[in-house]
Image (cartoon, helix red, strand yellow):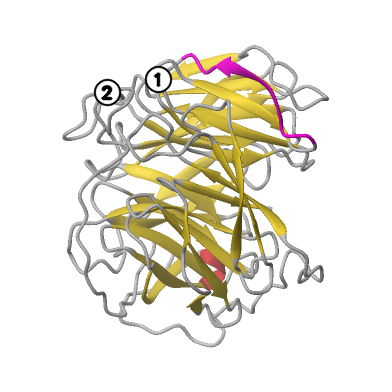
Amino acid sequence: MDRDARATRGSWTRRRFVGAVAGTAAVVAVPSPAAPPADSAPTAAERPAPRPAAQPPRKDPRPHPLYLGTYTSVEGGGTGIGLATYDPVTGRITGAGTLTGVPDPSYLALNPDGRTLYAVDERQDGAVTAVRLGDRRVLGSRSTGGASPCHLSVHPGGRWLLSANYQSGSVAVHPIDASGALGERTDLVTHTTPAPGPGQQGPHAHQFITSPDGGHVHAVDLGTDTVYTYRLDQAKGTLTEAAQAHTRPGAGPRHLTFHPGGRYAYLANEVDDTVAVCAYDPATGRLTIGDPQPTGSAGGTNYPAQILVTANGSYAFLANRGHNSIARYAVEADGARLRLLGTVPVAGDFPRQIAFSPDGRLLFAANQRSGTVSVFQVDTKSGELRLAGEPFASPVAVCALPL
């Protein structure tokens, strides 16, 4: 279940490698906190009109950059950040080498200005590394103050890097200077309350992101079954807790994503194999987590990983590790409801992470155990996914970042 025991250099850890079982799912109607009873179909009035895409379709047919995260300290892993390009029309990936000098870069993020790439160094002595994309120069690394950082994101203003230390159950903030390089850590907060959930030995911070309004940052902790909301002081880079939202015991929340409308979010729960719709109050930062809902795994062994929402707010997609599928949901009632449409085979083993291309026309799935990246054509009008050719081979693929 991608939560684990102590990370050990040169060997697989439970966070890095767990068992999986495939299965088949049926179409299921999914209730949510703000939804009418599950057996009542939405009326035409309830069904939100499709929002226009956030960005116009990309016109440039030239290959675009793709960066790939891996583990460098495991057998069969990579040697750094994988370099590739992809065709924005067909989705075809072409390898272009490796950027070495970054150990265990298991998660990647881009500065909003597009000039700097950031990677976690998922090791016992955790760090984050900045890479200037113009000349692919490593600008240096900074300690996260914890063990096994597994996620990072850049605050929308481009001045702060947020990272989550899985093994230590803590979140860190680093300043970003004008060159894109990282400064010394400005804050580190360890999740001490509530107590760990069933089967957990301590907190396990799995994600650290900013809400769409920019007013709050949210840390998802699998170990404490909690999503923590903080206010980020954008002058000092310090965190002040504003709220906590608790899942049911043992849910093991892993990944949160917001609806573009800004009033709802969707939470993937790794341990109990569910998703949940969350109501969000921008004024207070408080999340209200709804009832657990199915992932399409049909009860087999499955660990949901990452959930995404299309830019027009009409569909959501969930990576299912074990069932080895992408679950498809219709987003209804202005974001307040998810309706499971079914699942699509991912054409790989253990999809650890998924990502949209910037124009939303392609979806990339990094398949950890098969060492491949699958690409799907996305129909944003119908929510259909179509596999775009054979998956691309990439050693221990755990993150794909298309630009």
- Picture quadrant where residue 190 is located: top left
The numbered disc on residue 6 is 2
Q: Assess whether mark 1 and mark 2 are in contact (beta carbons under 8 angstroms).
A: yes
Instruction: Classify 120 as above or below 349.
Output: above
Q: Determine whether, in the image, residue 101 is placed left or right of residue 6.
A: right
Which residues, given as a range, are shown in magenta? 135-145
Q: Residue at x 37, y 20 (%)?
A: 168
Which residue in the rendered view is the most extreme toward the bottom?
Answer: 44
Q: Amino acid at mark 1?
A: Ala
Q: Amino acid at mark 2?
A: Arg
Instruction: Classify 253 as above or below 99.
Output: below
Magenta residue check for 395: no
Q: Residue at x 38, y 24 (%)?
A: 169
Is residue 172 visible to the viewer in this orientation of the structure?
yes
Query: Disc 2 to disc 1, how far (Cα)?
Result: 9 Å
Badge 1 is on which residue? Answer: 147
Q: Nearer the viewer, residue 275 or 264?
A: 275
Q: Determine whether, in the image, residue 392 is placed left or right of residue 27.
A: right
Q: Secondary structure at mark 1?
A: loop
- Picture quadrant where residue 201 is located: top left
- Crowding around mark 2 (Cα neighbors within 10 Å: few <14, some 14 to 19, many 20+) is some
